[in-house]
Amino acid sequence: MPLIPPTEERVRAFVAASGRFPDDLLGTLPPRDGRCTVEKLAINAVMAGAPAEAMPLLCAALDACVDPALDLFSLNTTTSSVVPGVFVNGPIRHTLDLPMEAGCFGGVPGTAPAIGRALRLVMRNVGGQRIGENSKSVFGQPGRVTGIVVAEWEERSPWPPLAKRRGVPGDAVTVYGCIGTMDIADVAADTGRRLVEIVGKSLAYPGTNAYISHWGAETMVCLPPPWADLIAADFPSIEDTQEAIWRAAAHPIDFFPAPHRDWLEERGRVDAGGIAHLVERPEEILVMVCGGLGNLHAMGLHNFGPTRAVTKAVVAEPGGTD
């Protein structure tokens, strides 16, 4: 892919857009423990072709990435295909022309691929992530090239925005480790109650990483507006929706082959009723509304293990460029 030369003039403009000083430390990135300053982020953002206006968002995303709850070391070195996905709320969605409607996970013209690529370049050039060396991903995924940057279609959601529900109103990013995207299709469900059964059972496929680890994983599902409206008719609150999906995202322990039953039981993954839930609690089902109005589909986004999504505010802090 082409790279834009990070000239001194361009880098200074990007640093200025961040509202911070060039040597402000954003964090130490594994696996090489590279120190990522605002200037280093700006260099990679220029090379990726991201707009300068995205610098506050990129700073917030990196702030989330280095939060211990996300466990970036594991994300950057695992055999899984996981990549930090960036999910955006607030007016900045429109300012940066981020995708939230039809085709939002890929194929829509806009700034998202360049913003995502900036983060991927930072992981490589500053964090030192190298496939086959310190990153043992068996397959990788397209998101390891251009990242995953998607906005919530807040105006079409029957529930409060994702970031606001997580305590950060306004402009915010939620960084969540995504193994990849999984289509969930349905043409038969005619009520929200029936639809959440399909969504939950689809999320809880037996080969997901959430079933091969101890408790601590989360799972995310993106619902298109028509499905969100149908579900909200039966489950008006987001908490009720999360609980309904959580209850459906489970299997009787006898559903699993014998070795897998033993594995789950040894790790305390089976409740008193003999049910193995995908995640431990309803709030560990993250729900966001985005996508087109074509109905028929939702998007499952699985985590790779006991790491947690992190939400940070997008702010342009007082600072300078010298």
Image (cartoon, rainbow, N blue to C red):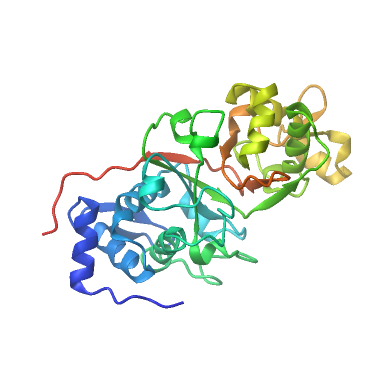
Q: Would you say residue 217 is visible in this rendering?
A: no
User: Looking at the image, which residue sits at the far front?
Assistant: 293
**x then y, percent, for residue 170:** 37, 35
**x then y, percent, for residue 259:** 84, 46
**x then y, percent, for residue 109:** 49, 62
Q: Considering depth in this image, is 75 or 295 the residue closer to the camera? A: 295
Q: Would you say residue 320 is visible in this rendering?
A: yes
Answer left or right for 186 relative to 83: right
**x then y, percent, for residue 100:** 52, 48
Say which residue appears at 76% left-offset and 43% top-offset: 202
Say which residue appears at 56% left-offset and 72% top-offset: 132
Q: Considering depth in this image, is 186 or 177 the residue closer to the camera? A: 186
Say which residue appears at 71% left-offset and 32% top-offset: 268
Q: Is residue 238 above or below residue 109?
A: above
Q: In this view, does 82 lie above or below 239?
A: below
Pick the quarter of the image with the C terminus: bottom left
